[in-house]
Image: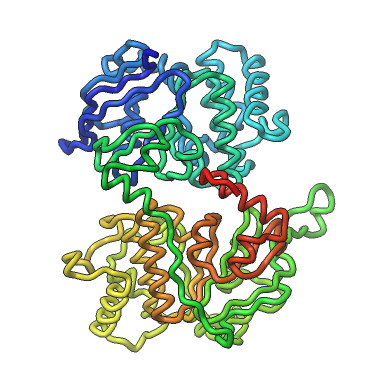
Amino acid sequence: MKPMLRVHNLHMSFQGREVVHGVTFEIKAGEKLALVGESGSGKTVTALSLLGLARGAWVRGEIRFEGRDLLQLQEHEWLGVRGSDIAMVFQEPMTALNPLFTIGDQISEVLQLKKGMTRQQAWTRAIDLLTDTGIPEPERRVNSYPHQLSGGQRQRAMIAMALAGEPKLLLADEPTTALDVSLRGQILDLLDSLQEKHGMAILLITHDLNMVRRFANRVLVMENGYLVEHGDVSTVLSHPQHAYTRRLVDSQPERNVFEPTDDAPVCMLGQGLRVSYPVPRAGWRGWFGRGEFVALQGADFHLKSGQTLGIIGESGSGKSSLALAALGLIPFKGDLKIDNRQWQFNAADDQPLRRAVQVVFQDPFSSLSPRMTVEEVVGEGLLVHAPDLNAMDRQTKVLAALREVGMDEEQFPGLLARYPHEFSGGQRQRLAIARALIVQPRMLVLDEPTSALDVSIQKQVLGLLQRLQRDMGLSYLLITHDIEVIQAMAHHVLVLKDGVVVESGGIDQVTRHPQSSYTRTLLAASYLTAGQTT
């Protein structure tokens, strides 16, 4: 079969620096092809070049779509390609969708521009597209703004918008990275069914090999702008030939945790924990008071010293509310004790607990101030919790904390004077962990600590956290939707659904012999996304 798209000897440069080196591949009609690589591999800019969207890049080579070389097109000619022949689903729909317009308006705009429909025809067709993508109550949701939809619904709306022009090739750039595991499976199933229904080809851009196993027919592997391996998914991932592909395949999290003794002291204890938020009441009742949304209800749990308590559940399950309560950042009812101390919500009284409980956030880029040097970022906590230290002693402690997470001046000359943007994602997360460790906490709240990282970097960071727990006896409250991370790190697991604990117990009990149907559903979705059987 003659290929629909043929990319030959593609080179891309930014300001004289080449980032894509002679890449060649093809896509047949109706094919599902995966383009795999870690951050900086060149996979996303390669995909953007297929739509002429790699702004500021010098591009040479050939990109032939149905025989026409796209690189020879003028800008006005690209408008006939984008959306009609080739469309794209972006990684983060909240930033890709316009917050000022309803979902219906944004889909209708594509239909009016690409299909010449009237406003009424486009609106009706927008509802049909939302129905195809499985959004509930499409007649109502078509009038919703992006912020009024859940993450999965926003991604479905993005897919509906991409399908509006009836493209022959759909580019899906990390379409499930920001979603819960069950939603990931749903989106992959949706893309499967839509691909079969419309007969379009799909190029999936991802760093998630589990998704590749689950979805694609063929795979291309990129490293540092080079295409290093390609072939059938089963062959490449079962018998990788290139060292980089082997490293990716071997990057699954490994369990290497210390098992505390049965008499280890309890670090955190929660009994009947309840978290609620005020919400406006509808109609005249809103004049006389506000309503209440209960985010967490009656949660009981405990965490021993040197243990990890994993919290799993979908968006809206109450995971974040539990974490915020543990950090003393929101009011709550019930009992929550850390080292037998309660949060008093008074700065002076709570200072010892603020030191005992530290947090590592999901995205190290946004959680580290871009205006502060490494020395200032890591040492900031000492200004509050050890104000008597002089500058030299503070610097000594900063260097010691950095060494603990595997960073030193020999490896990174001028380390203390550098800024966060000068480091990779994994290195920034190490800085975030050093910042948390420098005040010698008893417990870390880990909020999706590896979900924003590439698979090989994820494995390194998890290994670091495991070593720190063994060496320092740290307790972790681990919040994640990644079952593999839970299996690698957790001693006990708490499963939340709609603010209620539906199951709790040891890691083997919960993951191998789940009692709750909801837990079984989460695990089944995780295994399905990973291309495994339950």
Residue located 58% across and 41% down the image: 185
Residue located 31% across and 60% down the image: 427
Residue at the far right: name it.
284
Front residue of this view, candidates 306 and 152:
306
Front residue of this view, candidates 261 and 468:
261
Front residue of this view, candidates 245 and 492:
245
Q: Quadrant of the N terminus?
A: top left
Q: Position of residue 393 (x, y in %)?
A: 26, 85
Q: How is the image coloured?
A: rainbow
Residue 240 position by quadrant: top left
Above or below, 119 against 162 in this view is above
Residue located 59% across and 27% down the image: 193
Front residue of this view, candidates 74 and 130:
130
Q: Position of residue 111 (x, y in %)?
A: 56, 18
Q: Position of residue 270 (x, y in %)?
A: 66, 76
Residue located 82% across and 47% down the image: 283
Above or below, 104 against 427 in this view is above
Q: Position of residue 86 (x, y in %)?
A: 43, 21
